[in-house]
Amino acid sequence: MNTTPALVLRRLIGLATTLLLAAFVVFAVLSVLPGDPAAVMLGVGARPDTLAALRAEMGLDRPVAVRFVSWTGGLFVGDFGVSHTYGVPVLDLVLERAAVSLPLALLAAGGAVFVGVPLGALAASQRGGVLDTVLMALAQVGIAVPSFWLAIMLSLVFAVGLDWLPAGGFPGWEAGVWPGLRALFLPALALALPQGAVLARVARSAVLEALHQDYVLTARMKGLSKGAALWRHALPNALIPVATVLGLQLAFLLTGAIVVENVFYLPGVGRLLFQAIAQRDLITVQGIVVLVVTAVVCINFVVDLTYLWLDPRLRTRGA
């Protein structure tokens, strides 16, 4: 019996519950911080009337329960507050910066898959051989190398030395798709190579396990070549652990690129979060954290649905 709708409904309920709990945790953490958040934002030299006005604007003069209900209700209608530093709604500010961070994350994730999965499968097909040893050694180096160091090296080589690509900044998508992609290429590469190394190791382990399954051995006994059995049977059935890791990586890439965005002076969400923390703009920090949690939960929901697509057994009650 097909149970896909029931499974999707359970996932949706879990998603909504997680988002509500995440909102509560974010609100609680900021509420129990020592000191007055308004005083933290304005600094020690703030005038009493200015401090009182900001406290009223942030709702700090109301009971905690009322503030939580009011803030949570605002989240449902897209009201994340107004940035104290920029004077614009936090949601508008984040969406503007997401026009840089989201393409960057997608390019990096796509590059990681393009590099990591085929190399991991290739290494698994040559288990114990020279190629396997070399590829896994390179993957280990890729995992160990920090993204920010790799970003600096790529900038020195391809931007400063060869002058092939811009060293930093973002021209805006209004300048054209190609100039925007050129500005994102080196940052995406700096993020993709370490993540691709992780995917290569995961793909190798998953493919090695799949190669010893009965369906692959049966295909080989029927005369299917080793390469065909690898790419047509083993690799597709090894994609579930790869999808799991890729979902975690994409969630990391959305905001984990703070250092890389600063290296290349990209006006993304990661850099916005860094600037908001430095400027003590707690309203913006709170809004970004909630939106990031929402993005992470939604990505995990998509990964769960991907499991159902990759493995039909999960769509039946007897799975």
Image (cartoon, rainbow, N blue to C red):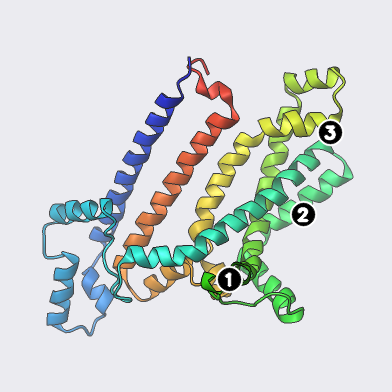
Dividing the picture into quarters, in which one does residue 97 lie? Answer: bottom left
Is 31 on the left or on the right of 273, as rendered?
A: left
- Mark 2: amino acid: Leu
Q: Secondary structure at mark 1?
A: loop
- Residue under numbered circle 2: 138
Q: Nearer the viewer, mark 2 or mark 1?
A: 1
Q: Residues within 10 Å of mark 2 (few under 14, many from 20)?
A: some
Please report whichever mark, 2 or 1, sits nearer to the chain's N-terminal start.
Answer: 2
On screen, 14 above or below 265? Answer: above
Please report whichever mark, 1 or 3, sits nearer to the chain's N-terminal start.
Answer: 1
On screen, 194 above or below 311? Answer: below
Please report whichever mark, 2 or 3, sits nearer to the chain's N-terminal start.
Answer: 2
- Mark 3: amino acid: Gly
Gap between marks 1 and 3 measured at Cα: 42 Å
On screen, 171 above or below 219? Answer: below
Q: Are marks 1 and 3 in contact (CB under 8 Å)?
A: no
Q: Residues within 10 Å of mark 1 (few under 14, many from 20)?
A: few
- Residue under numbered circle 1: 176
- Mark 1: amino acid: Gly
Q: Give percent across and percent down for residue 53.
A: 14, 75
Q: Give percent across and percent down for residue 139.
A: 73, 52
- Residue under numbered circle 3: 227
Dividing the picture into quarters, in which one does residue 311 lie? Answer: top right
Q: Are marks 2 and 3 in contact (CB under 8 Å)?
A: no
The residue lying at 56 percent from left, 50 percent from top is 249
Query: Can I make out residue 285 in this image?
Result: no
Q: Nearer the viewer, mark 2 or mark 3?
A: 3
